Amino acid sequence: MTQDQELQQAKKILLGGGVVGLPTETVYGLAASIQSEEGLRKIFAIKDRPFFDPLIVHIASANQRSQVARDWPPAAEALAKKFWPGPLTLVLPKNPSINSVITAGLDTVGVRMPAHPAARALISLMETPLAAPSANKFGKTSPTKAEHVRDSFRDENLFVIEGGPSEVGLESTVVRLSSSGGPAEILRPGAITQRQIEDTLKAAGLDMPVVRAESSASPGHTPQHYMPDLPLVIIEAEGPRIPAEKQKKIFDDFQLSSSAHGVELLLDTSPKLAARSLYSKMRECAEQNFDFIYVFRTKYRTGDLWDAIWDRVDRAASGKY
Ligand code: TXA
Ligand code: MG
């Protein structure tokens, strides 16, 4: 199929109340039309996603934004101008017409303009925004390739648009903005860093603090998330070997025999590459014939994008040693 044919096929499915796998530059999404309650409900059903976890709405042009958000404060304008299309989701007061299935009954909505050309093309073709969470079963590793999506939903016969590997590799930064001038709250760290957000607001003449919200502020960003199919442990050491006393503790905690073997999740030294390949590597490690996965939290892997990477690894981990 050509990409045009894929997009036409996806449109047909979405108009019929179905869902499709959608490539984006962050991770692949599981998309439905915001006009189709049937499609929206299907997202929750096939992901096993709890109904209290709201979906992000994806738009392709600035004039679609008022269909989604009720207010557009100056901070939203400044951040969208700088980072859209791209890996930034803004949480804003919702337009009353937005289906409460999307927002899990909240009066705010997450909105993002993705950069991936296939995502933009499908939204334009549909002439309506698409709601899409990451295309994985709830709590599991997010997909960064079309085949990851097919693997996660083998039983559903899901149609996935082929879009190549996701360039960013981590889910978008989620920032909540209030209309009444409160702080900008980072609900989920991502490729757009706190410093970039602060600098952008300052450059726009907006004097507002940027804070990292308590994780309970993001309904779906639970402590246990992104988990691979094998237990993953973080070793607080420089490597390359697991210190003997830590190894013993891991074997005890996971009731492994003394002949058990771990496989190392080897992160790239460049944070950009580490982010891009993180979820693929987690999947590859889990598919191999080992008993657990381990990763070293080395000292030089700190700051900026590393914060988002460790946020995901921390949530994917079953233990820290
Ligand atoms: O990069 C991404 O954001 C990807 C691609 C597909 O766009 N999507 C994604 O969606 O990661 P999901 O559903 O896996 O994560 C969305 C996060 C969840 O933690 C959810 O709780 C939060 O955004 N969220 C959405 N709407 C919200 C709202 N109104 N208030 C607070 N948090 C919200
Ligand atoms: Mg997700």
Image (cartoon, helix red, strand yellow):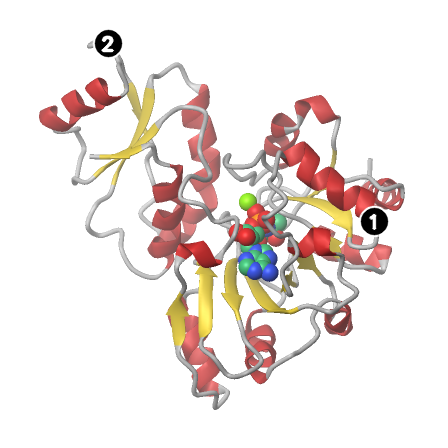
The single residue placed furthest to the bottom in the displayed view is: 205
Answer left or right for 303 relative to 321: right
Mark 2 and mark 1 in contact? Answer it, CB < 8 Å. no
Disc 2 marks which amino acid?
Ser
Mark drawn on residue 265:
none
Quick one: 47 or 59, which is closer to the camera?
47
Q: Is residue 297 above or below residue 249?
A: below
Indicate the quadrant containing the C terminus: top left, top right, bottom left or bottom right. Answer: top left
Tag 1 residue: 36
Q: Is residue 8 above or below residue 233?
A: below
Residue 17 visible in the displayed image: yes
Q: Is the residue marked 2 within 8 Å of ligand 2, measured from its CB?
A: no
Answer left or right for 252 relative to 187: left
Residue drawn 36% across the image and 26% down it: 231
Residue drawn 51% across the image and 61% down it: 174
Residue drawn 35% across the image and 16% down it: 290
Disc 1 marks which amino acid?
Ser
Indicate the quadrant containing the N terminus: top left, top right, bottom left or bottom right. Answer: top right
| Ligand 2 quarter of the rendering | top right
